[in-house]
Image (cartoon, coloured by chain):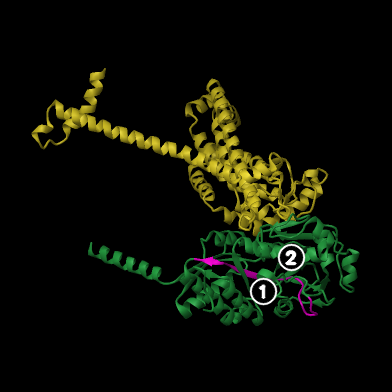
Amino acid sequence: MPEKTDEKVRMPLRDMPEKRASDSGPVAAARRYASARAGDAVFKGAAWFFAASVIALMLLIFAVLLKESWLSIKTFGLGFITSSTWDPVALEFGALPSIYGTLVSSAIAIIIALPISVGIAIFLTEMAPKRVSGPVGSAIELLASIPSIIYGMWGLFVFAPVLSEYVEPFLIDHLGFIPLFSGAPLGIGMLPAGFILAIMIIPFISSVTRDIFRMVPPMLKESGYGVGATKWEVIRKIVIPYTRSGIIGAVILGLGRALGETMAVTFLIGNAQNISISLLDPATSISATLANEFTEAFEDLYLSSLVELGLILFLITFVVLAIAKLLIARFSYQGGKF
Amino acid sequence: MKKILLLTIIFLAAALGTASAQLINGAGATFPYPLYSKWAYEYNRATGVRVNYQSIGSGGGIRQVTAGTVDFGASDAPLGAKEVEDAGLVQFPMAVGGVVPVVNLAGVGPGSLKLTGDVLADIFLGKITKWNDEHIAALNPGVKLPDAKITVVHRSDGSGTTWIFANYLSKTSPEWKGRVGFGTAVNWPAGVGGKGNEGVAMYVKRMKNSIGYVEYAYAVQNKLAYAKLGNKAGNFVEPSMESFQAAASNADWKGTPGFGVVLTEQPGKDSWPIAGATFILVKKSQSDCKKVSEVLKFFDWAYRNGADMARSLDYVPVPPAVYGLMEAAWASEIRCDSQPVWGK
């Protein structure tokens, strides 16, 4: 075996044009072989370096965030996460409203976006004729590339008036007995922010889901149809279980975008540092607080507290991704059995 | 190849050309940005000196000028005498503006609603929640006020506008002073936050029965219904260039250390009670003598030639009596290599 590998390596070298006599013969070949090995080592080193630089960058960001927020961490300790007072005048800072807003608006977005995205993906892969699925698929990919400021302005100027005129009065009249839907129809608040986030992440989730639905082996589906299953049964019992880990991956991709989304949320969430059970009330999120207050924060403690908010967002995203990896690992194991 | 060489030479020459022209860098408050850009443009045409102003926010401006990364900083809120001293800065006002309460009420046009500072504070505290509240009705006999909930709109971002407005409420309402206080951002007891003057103007325009506060220019441009305010002398005044000017000229510029004059609740029967100046900050001890004298020349030019440009953009220029004071301060406080820079 080793001889054979050697032969393979040397083969292309022998085919090279030979200019000097000394270029031939086993010694020269060995030298060339060694220089090829050196090239390999350089390449390997470079690849390692690039891969490591990603990790290094992440660690550096973490270190800088930690360093800059140290003053706030020292001053407020755990109280920073549990307090809901955000008072720049008295220099008392608590991140709870921002954390709550980030998590709840992203959760609303996922709850709305997931079924719609899976529906779009099923339609595109299982039902739509080719001349429909092509343009619709491209349109969805285009949606994903619209800058978030455009979504924010569209949300504020077009979407919010519709919400405050029609959607929110309807919710208040019919579901107002649930505290979640009490309050005034302002058109801006937690729910509108969740809606706009949902619209923003649908393209991501649906295009990834569509691609993984396409990877379901046709034989599996045809076997399903062969034993008399309906389209619904094939989708529910074969396509979705087969692609479960992929769907979770797509959701995480969407969630990652929703958690960190800034401008669109800032335009629509209402930017009020409070925690209200009602989804119609104005709220805030970590990224919205940062976008709003970073420019005018002069005092060291104020700035440090804002950086600590950034650190918390970093950790939340990290934890969400870690949970996702675990889920994917678990579900793909089960998926193998089915 | 020759072409490329030629192009490179042209580019290099161009780069050198710009580098040799004087360039002044400034950063800070967003409110005076249109004014400073206009001045910079006209100054460049008149003298060839380039002034580059980045509107990154007052906080950033103060940080950058203290760190020495820009030649001047700009802040909407005055720094206290001690802060100015500690940071080794000189502070001087460049323009005056007014903050205006704006409302969206069916049938209520500009200037037909009257408010006082304590009622305004109670509305923003969330204590007065309905438009037909007796306190509002008592000030407005004959105005039809709806039985509707008040939606309070405030700034979500840190801002000099908020500083001025909250400072006014602190002066007129002890409860506001105790519970909220003032700063570029405060802990709002009620309401929704809009980003920027344009955000607040947009929200008030769209939401029925809302009240907010914006810089005067935004109220004019968006045709919002502003309220008249009762001033310290007990008169109800309209927001206008004249009433802002009145507030500025009644202020005690000379007796305020660091010139951090706050123009809210100024005496005088014509004074608009929520006025404020926007300030420039320059380091006291300088090392680049040529640069700092260029900076001061620019502001001297702006004081003497910039008033009409300011008015055309809805800013009120500082009263002429103030220039002399400021330039005396430059001469006595700014040093380069321990030598005075101005008025040599």
Q: Type of residue at label 1?
A: Val
Residue B193 visible within the image: yes
Q: Residue at x 59, y 79 (%)?
A: B303
Nearest the eye: B267 or B296: B296
Image position of A142 (left or right of A233): left
Nearest the eye: A269 or A95: A95
Quadrant in which residue A292 is drawn: bottom right
Nearest the eye: A292 or B90: B90
Q: Residue furthest left?
A: A21
Q: Is residue B222 above or below residue A21?
A: below
Residue underneath mark 1: B96
The subunit letter for the residue under badge 1 reads B
Residue B150 visible within the image: no
Quadrant in which residue B247 is drawn: bottom right
Image position of B273 (left or right of B88): right
Q: Residues within 10 Å of mark 2 (few under 14, many from 20)?
A: many
From the image, which quarter does the N terminus of chain B lie in? bottom left
The subunit letter for the residue under badge 2 reads B
Label 2, label 1: how far apart the Cα atoms are: 14 Å
Chain letter for green, please. B
Residue underneath mark 2: B165
- Tint applied to chain A in the drawing: yellow
Please give the range of residues in magenta.
B267-286
Q: Residues within 10 Å of mark 1 (few under 14, many from 20)?
A: many
Image position of B340 (left or right of B154): left
Secondary structure of the residue carrying numbered label 1: strand
Secondary structure of the residue carrying numbered label 2: helix
User: In the rendered structure, does residue A142 fall within the stretch colored magenta?
Assistant: no
